[in-house]
Amino acid sequence: MMHGNRNILQRRGRHPPHQYLLEIGGIDLEEFIRNSRAYAIAAWILMPIITVVFEWVWTIIFSSSQYVLKNVILFLLLLVVINLSFKSFVPRYKRGRMLTVGLFWLVLFIIFDVIYYEYLLLIGSNTLWVEYNWFLGGLRWLVLLAMLLGPFFMVRTHVGDPDLFSMPIGKMATIGLLPSSLKIAYYRRKGAEIGEGVSIGPLSILDCKKAVIGDFAEIGMACMIRANEFVMGKYSNLGMLVIIDTHKVVIGEEVTIQEQVYIGGLKTDKSEIEIGDLSMIFAQSVINPTHPIKIGKRVGIGGSNFLFTHGTWQPILDGFPVAFGPITIEDGVWFPWRVFVLPNVNIGKEATIGAGSVINRDIPARSLAAGVPAKVLRTGDEYIKKYSDAEKRNILRNVLTEFVGYLRIEDWNVEDSELEDSYASAVFRTPRGPSSKIDNQVIFLFEDTEEVWSKVRDRAFVITLFSLGESKTVEIEQDGSWWFDLENSTWGGKRTKVSLVVNAWLSRYGHWLKYTR
């Protein structure tokens, strides 16, 4: 009997008491909490308590509760309470699960606020409406914003997830809430060079000593950019919840970084990342530029890829390996999903890496490598096909046929394709907009002859298998049409929604064309 009690006490010493009690009944507390989100939802009860106490104190001091400053202070106070709550007694959760919790908090607070004003303060719904009305100077909607997004930003996540509370929350809750135009004006006054047509989404901030952003660049919602030097080329795009926190960042033109990409980690004076024109980094990738990372032009970094320029944890003086070193990814490289790159690696031009690979050594140009660790499987002509002119024409006919099918499911009005030996074309109208009222033509030209050019109509999207001279591109643009040069990987004409659809379709087949205007 004594042995049994001793064993119980030993088990209790190894685990928290509440976990031990639930384990007796065969219940795993951590798993229960993780799945139910009960603690996170229950933590909301602190919000009305803090609100009532604050409102009561405010009324005693200022004799009235109708102050804009009151709601701003309440908003900041609730952010602090939410942060302390999630740090103190709310368990770790996956961040994505907190969006549902935030929605619960939002609904509960609206119900509480209505009851509080109507039945406790006996003020009436008209006063509450004034407090929530932006145009009348009320800012109580900030509290609803804290309810909706507070759990998402403040939650402690499992090891490996970026810590979003390391963001400068104060700036996000003030400057971040400004409309894009006012935010841009503010950063320009702070010395940033921001071009025309730039968009910076809600809650997004720049915390940079030097910032240069090119024309028509877009920064999505809730992005945090912290760098000593940040350069972003024209027409580049950052998706929602991109976090950049490193010494120096240079992003080329027409670069896309999708949602929830994290660029940061240990900082040194060598910490910098350079991303070439037309490259794309897909969602949920983690890039660690402790030492320099250089990504070339037209590089595809698939989703959930990991690039680390350092590998260290165990003590070097005890003989454990510690590695720091740069990563270079040359032009045209393709990483599918879940590729892990270690320090001191160079990946040659137009190399392809198999999904799930770990790269710990250099990969030669124009090769196919895969495995853990990655090994070269094929190189040169063993891997990359050489098509004849006739085969290329047939491929482009199929590209047009697929494009017509896609446009039809998107409710575009498209005539049947003309698939000839020297060209392939289709006539279409869009569902809405200027292109819905007049015929448009998409045409692939396989030969540079006068007879073939005579097939080009007005408002044409001309895609050529051959190189176009400057005089010809100017002529096409002056006629109100567009051109796409597959030989030189460039395109031009007025940048419209339809031209972007055509360009995006070509990119599906690996032809990433640079806009020349």
Image: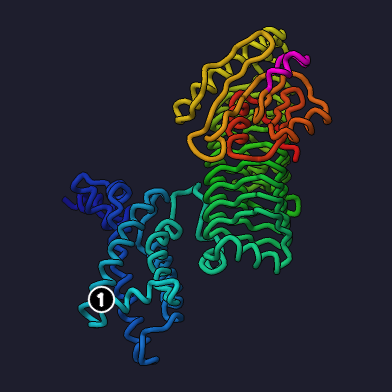
512 sits to left or right of 126 = right
Where residue 124 appears, x then y in whole percent?
25, 79
Where residue 127 appears, x then y in whole percent?
32, 79
The residue under the point 52% across, 59% down is 202
Foreground of the two, 105 or 23: 105
Examine the rendered structure and indicate whether residue 52 appears above or below residue 309: below
Label 1 residue SS: helix
Dot 1 corresponds to which residue?
Answer: 116
Foreground of the two, 49 or 156: 49
Examine the rendered structure and indicate whether residue 209 appears above or below residue 75: above
Total numbered labels: 1
User: Magenta segment: does it hold 450?
Assistant: yes
Image quadrant containing the C terminus: top right
User: As shown in the figure, which amino acid type bears the numbered disc 1?
Assistant: Tyr
Where residue 275 appears, x then y in whole percent?
70, 41
The residue under the point 26% across, 82% down is 123
Q: Quadrant of residue 374?
A: top right
- Start-end of magenta stretch: 445-456
Q: Quadrant of residue 136?
A: bottom left
281 sits to left or right of 329 = left
The residue under the point 54% across, 23% down is 403
Foreground of the two, 343 or 180: 180
372 sits to left or right of 275 = left
User: Magenta segment: does it hold 468?
Assistant: no
Where residue 158 appears, x then y in whole percent?
44, 49
Q: Is residue 309 visible?
A: yes
The residue under the point 72% across, 18% down is 454
Q: Is residue 319 visible?
A: no
